[in-house]
Image (tube, rainbow, N blue to C red):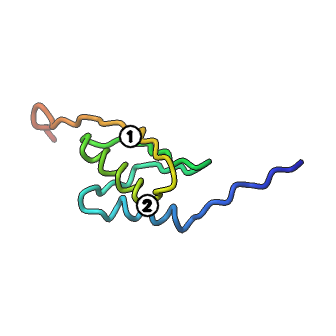
Amino acid sequence: MVSEPRVVDEYADAEVHRMLTEDGTICEQGIEVIRRDGAVLLRGQVETAHRRDAIGERVAAMFPDKHVCNDIVVTAVAGPSEPEVIT
């Protein structure tokens, strides 16, 4: 028996990425969105837990019939401790 390839809805994928990029409270381009078997997996890094949670909520609203697994990591970004000297 030959299994059929998984059909990817490229329009829905593009819509998710556009929402993540254009939403003024999110503005993220580096989030990976993987949809399969009734679930949506989110991976990537953001600066705050608030932004991670906002992404999860917005994607869950786009796919209310799917389980959203938010594996986005919060990475603290600190400013430089001293000015960079350019010579």
Residue 86 in the image, given as x and y percentages of width and height: 16, 41
Q: How many marks?
A: 2
Instruction: Tell me which label, 2 or 1, sits earlier in the chain.
Output: 2
Corner quadrant of residue 29: bottom left
User: Could you tell me which secondary element the residue under label 2 belongs to?
Assistant: helix
Q: Residue furthest left?
A: 82
Disc 1 marks a residue whose amino acid type is Ile
Between residues 71 and 21, which one lies in front from this camera angle?
71
Considering only vertical position in the picture, is 65 above or below 86? below
- Mark 1 = which residue? 72
- On the image, which quarter does residue 87 sit in? top left
For the point 58% across and 50% down, which residue is it? 38
**Left or right relative to 55: residue 65:** right
How packed mark 1 is, by other alpha carbons closer than 10 Å (few <14, some 14-19, many 20 or more), is many
Task: Name which residue lies at 43% across and 60% down.
Answer: 62
Is residue 70 left or right of 82 when viewed as pictured?
right
Residue 20, percent across and down?
36, 58
- Residue type at mark 2 is Met
Residue appearing at x 62%, y 48% in the figure: 37
Cα–Cα span, label 2 and label 1: 17 Å
Q: Could you tell me residue 60's position as x and y percent? A: 41, 53
Which residue in the rendered view is the most extreme toward the bottom?
A: 11
76 shown above or below 30: above
- For this rendering, which residue is in front, 52 or 77? 52
Q: Nearer the viewer, mark 2 or mark 1?
A: 2
> Few, some or many C-alpha atoms within 10 Å of disc 2 (few <14, some 14-19, many ≥20)?
few
Residue farthest toward the top in the current orientation of the protein: 81
| Residue that numbered label 2 is attached to | 62
